[in-house]
Structures are given as structure tokens and as C-alpha cells.
Image (spheres, rainbow, N blue to C red):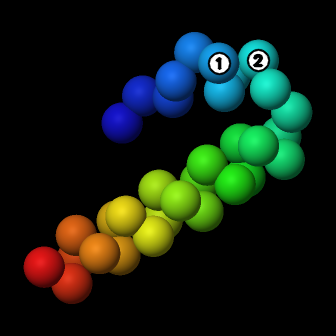
Amino acid sequence: MALPFHLTSRPIRDLRLWLRRTDKLISIFKEL
């Protein structure tokens, strides 16, 4: 998965939030 362009220029805080969202999606895919 590639990071959206607008996130790369943002602070690390937003990046951590994005990683949390992706972790949730990955956990859902693992459950499937």
C-alpha cells in the first residue's frame, strides 16, 4: 500500500493516525 501524497507532507501525528486506520483494515482482512 502506498501513502497518499497529501499525507507525506503532513506531521508524524497524522501519519500515526493513518497507520492506526490501516492496522484496523488489515485486522478486518485477517478476520475474513
Q: Crowding near pointer 2: few (<14 within 10 Å), some, many (20+)?
A: few
Q: Is residue 20 left or right of residue 29?
A: right
Q: Is residue 29 left or right of residue 5?
A: left
Say the numbered circle drawn on residue 6: 1
Q: Residue at x 42, y 28 (%)?
A: 2
Q: Residue at x 83, y 40 (%)?
A: 12
Q: Please identify the quadrant where the N terminus is shown.
A: top left
How many numbered tags mark residues here?
2
The answer to whether the residues at label 2 and label 1 have Cβ atoms under 8 Å apart is yes
SS at badge 2: loop
Q: Residue at x 45, y 70 (%)?
A: 24
Q: Residue at x 53, y 59 (%)?
A: 21
The single residue placed furthest to the bottom in the displayed view is: 31
SS at badge 1: helix
Percent across and percent down for residue 19 are 59, 54
Percent across and percent down for residue 6 are 65, 18
Tag 2 residue: 9
Percent across and percent down for residue 13 are 84, 47
Residue type marked 2:
Ser
CA gap, disc 2 and disc 1: 6 Å
Residue type marked 1:
His
Q: Is residue 28 left or right of residue 18?
A: left
Q: Is residue 3 above or below residue 28?
A: above
Quarter residue 32 falls in: bottom left
